[in-house]
Amino acid sequence: MPQNSMLAHLLSKADISYVNLPLEALVCEQYHLASVPDYPIAAIAASEDGLDVGSAYWLRADPVYLVLQRDSFSLSEPCPLPVLRQHAEAIIASFNQHFEQDGLKFCLGNSGAWYVRLEQPPQVSTVLPAMAMGKNIAHYMPQGAAASVWVAYLNEVQMLLHGHAANAARELVGDVVINSIWLSGGGVMPAALTTKATAIDCIIGNSVFYQGLARHSGIVYQEVSLSVQDTISQFTKQSNVRLQLTQEMLLEEQTFQVLLNALNTKKISQLVINLACYEQTLVAKINPIDLYKFWRKSKPMSAYLV
């Protein structure tokens, strides 16, 4: 984003700090979800994604494209790759046929997300994709007692994907091939909280994870279906609202203009922006009075990506 963008202007007025956690991990911490050894993102998401979670152990199995570098592979964006449902179903059927004897059950959620269901914990820890993006993946493979087993599984996945008919169809239309999966967010479904986990009254989101997080935390969830302006108007009686911006909203100047106007008119008493910066999260807190700090000049967005 340019230096004169509305987001850059808002950040210039904010009290900024950095948390050494990817955004997904920070959100989990904010809702008192423990990393044992992973944050149980997969189970929470799967529970709202049309899958019977039960007491099984779940992992996300995001379809990805690994880029060959000079002497290593790196994880490229986006993660997960967008995949047509018929292609996803065909690939997952191949996985299940191959891994049935190993006790791995691949599942496709209503949202299109890919998961692995296990009857027992896998004895490995995984890394959220934001941590590994653009880096040598050798340092971010599953770790733990069964690491060698899971690295072997991933090698088998890559062989199954090589030359798969679904990938051939993707190439025909110019889509990047799926050459691996990224495992993360492992765990069993945590017990629902009996009291609210945070001061948040409502989560407005566009992901099954946020939907499951709301249910787990005992707070209201609503899908993002309104403009930011209409959302602010509809939820003025709520004390604390968490809004997960869609990709389209993030790219629209109007989104941040509306937030700036709402601060100016005190419809928002405090705005907290959490910006994902790969392995870190930028947290910007802005109060209406901060907008009068005229001596703070806008900086390029790159200045905030430390």
Image (cartoon, grey):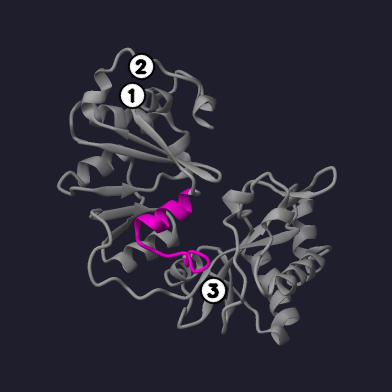
Badge 2 crowding class, 10 Å Cα cut-off, few under 14, some 14 to 19, many 20 or more, is some
Residue at the limit of the structure toward the top, as seen here? 295
The correct choice, above or below, for 69 with respect to 194 in the image is above
| Residue in view at x 62 percent, y 48 percent | 78
Residue 120 figure quarter:
bottom right
Q: What residue does disc 2 label?
A: 296
Residue 295, percent from left and from top: 33, 12
Instruction: Calculate the distance from the C-alpha at mark 3 to the C-alpha at mark 2.
Output: 47 Å
Q: What residue does disc 3 label?
A: 58
Residue 42, percent from left and from top: 51, 67
**Side (left or right) of 285 relative to 119:** left
| Residue in view at x 74 percent, y 52 percent | 66
Q: What residue does disc 1 label?
A: 13
Label 2, secondary structure: give it.
loop
Report if the CB atoms under discs 1 and 2 are less than 8 Å apart: yes
Q: Earlier in the sequence, mark 1 or mark 2?
A: 1
Q: Is residue 204 magenta?
A: no
From the viewer's side, name the closer residue of 278 and 112.
278
Where the C terminus falls, by quadrant? Answer: top right
Residue 165, percent from left and from top: 79, 65
Q: Amino acid at mark 1?
A: Lys
Q: Amino acid at mark 3?
A: Trp
Residue 108, percent from left and from top: 57, 70
| Residue in view at x 22 percent, y 28 percent | 288
Q: Earlier in the sequence, mark 1 or mark 3?
A: 1
**Side (left or right) of 141 relative to 168:** left
| Residue in view at x 28 percent, y 17 percent | 293
Q: Write the start and end of the magenta stretch as one range.
A: 23-40
Residue at the limit of the structure toward the front, as seen here? 145
